[in-house]
């Protein structure tokens, strides 16, 4: 077993995967980092102001309950809109990641000047990143993303079939 080749492959994979996700966040910054989750709050009228009435009568209690219910409904609607907008935005982000990985996979497949360990590192990195992105952005239901995933699958099969002989004997230097 040639440990040097395995080390090179591991280094490429370990740098490639975060590089792609960071790059996607750079080119698609909305809904990332601090913007990844809805942080809208309840309005000023959601809860009774301090000091809270110690013994509210029925009219006050009904008014407080109605305000809280209305505020919570508004919050849920805003949360739902945020989630819908986020999924719509993340569809193209997933397609970007999948297309980039497909391009790298094709580069690893058809560029004959790459060393075997570099080619295998790019192959494993692009496949692992595509898998991770598919899991992460699964709910986007992107039709274009699915098409790219299918092409990636067949390119992966072609890569394995074409390059299998160069990876079978790891004892070669």
Image (tube, grey):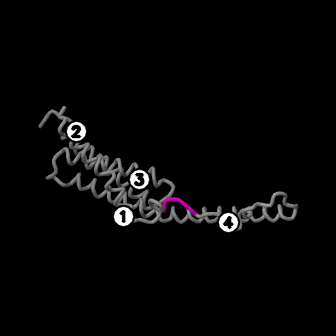
Which quadrant would the C terminus be assigned to in this image? top left
> Disc number at residue 133?
3
- The residues bearing labels 2 and 4 have C-alpha atoms spaced at a distance of 54 Å
Q: CA distance from mark 1 to mark 4?
A: 32 Å
User: x and y percent of residue 68 in the render?
Assistant: 73, 62
Looking at the image, tell me whether mark 3 or mark 4 is earlier in sequence order: 4
Q: Residues within 10 Å of mark 2 (few under 14, many from 20)?
A: some
In the rendered image, residue 38 lying in the magenta stretch gets the answer yes
- Magenta stretch holds residue 70: no
**Sooner in the amino-acid sequence: mark 3 or mark 2:** 2
For marks 1 and 2 on the same chain, the one whose residue lies earlier in the sequence: 2
Q: Residue furthest right?
A: 58
Q: Which residue is mark 1?
A: 26
Q: Which element is circle 1 on?
A: helix
- Residue 172, compared with residue 115, is above or below; it is above
> Magenta stretch?
35-39
> In the figure, is residue 9 to the left or right of 135?
left
Q: Are marks 1 and 4 in contact (CB under 8 Å)?
A: no
Local SS, label 4: helix
User: Where residue 97 sits in the image (x, y, percent)?
Assistant: 37, 58
Q: Which residue is mark 4?
A: 74
Determine the main secondary structure of the stretch shown in magenta: loop
Mark 1 vs 4, N-terminal side: 1
Residue 6's disc number: 2
């Amino acid at each position: 077993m040639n440990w040097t080749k395995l080390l090179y492959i591991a280094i490429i994979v370990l740098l490639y995967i975060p590089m792609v996700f960071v790059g996607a966040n750079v080119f698609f910054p909305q809904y990332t980092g601090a913007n990844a989750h809805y942080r809208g709050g309840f309005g000023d009228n959601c809860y009774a102001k301090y000091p809270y009435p110690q013994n509210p009568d029925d009219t006050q209690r009904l008014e407080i309950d109605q305000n809280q219910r209305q505020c919570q409904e508004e919050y849920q609607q805003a949360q739902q809109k945020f989630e819908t907008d986020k999924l719509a935005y993340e569809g193209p982000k997933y397609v970007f990641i999948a297309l980039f990985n497909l391009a790298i996979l094709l580069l690893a497949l058809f560029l004959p000047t790459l060393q075997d360990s570099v080619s295998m590192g790019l192959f494993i990195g692009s496949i692992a990143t595509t898998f991770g992105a598919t899991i992460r952005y699964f709910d986007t239901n992107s039709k274009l993303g699915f098409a790219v995933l299918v092409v990636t699958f067949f390119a992966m099969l072609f890569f394995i079939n074409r390059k299998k002989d160069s990876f079978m004997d790891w004892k070669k230097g």
